[in-house]
Image (cartoon, rainbow, N blue to C red):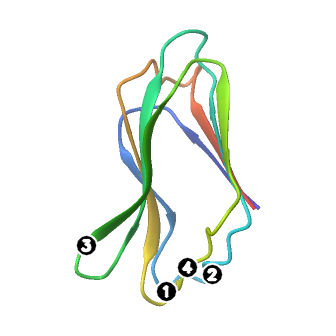
Amino acid sequence: MQTFNITSATTTTLRDIHADIGGNVKSIRLTNTHASTAVTVSLFLEDSSSNKFYVIDTDIPGHTTLLLEENLSFSNRLFSLKLTTTAGGLSTSTPLSVIIK
């Protein structure tokens, strides 16, 4: 299991290409901990040529969890798994919480 608390608008590498942790993903839980402000998230695979293949591109309302648990595995030799966050009230006290299993 991996956990991340994303506190600003940024791109986060969740699983790096050729990393020791493979691309066998059973679920990804994205929780917006802000009380009222939505956060925009883009979850995508990226190859070594920086081509992006989007899994989701959506807004997560405040105090809401988005659970992804279908068709998430990928070849870690070919792709990295990344998450871009924009907008929202992200901060150290109201992060986007990400759990990968």
Crowding near pointer 1: few (<14 within 10 Å), some, many (20+)?
some
The residue indicated by pointer 3 is 51
The CA span between labels 2 and 4 is 8 Å
For residue 22, the mark is 2
Q: Earlier in the sequence, mark 3 or mark 4?
A: 3
Q: Earlier in the sequence, mark 2 or mark 3?
A: 2
Q: Position of residue 77 (x, y in %)?
A: 48, 90
Q: Secondary structure at mark 4?
A: loop
Label 3 vs label 1, nearer the camera: 3
| Residue at horizontal 63 percent and vertical 23 percent from the top | 33
Q: Earlier in the sequence, mark 3 or mark 1?
A: 1
Q: Secondary structure at mark 2?
A: loop
The residue indicated by pointer 4 is 74
Q: Position of residue 37 (x, y in %)?
A: 48, 14
With respect to residue 29, does 89 lie above or below? Answer: above
Label 2 vs label 3, nearer the camera: 3
With respect to residue 82, does 41 lie above or below? Answer: above
With respect to residue 57, does 81 lie above or below? Answer: below
- Viewer-side residue, 71 vs 63: 71
| Residue at horizontal 49 percent and vertical 32 percent from the top | 7
Q: Earlier in the sequence, mark 2 or mark 4?
A: 2
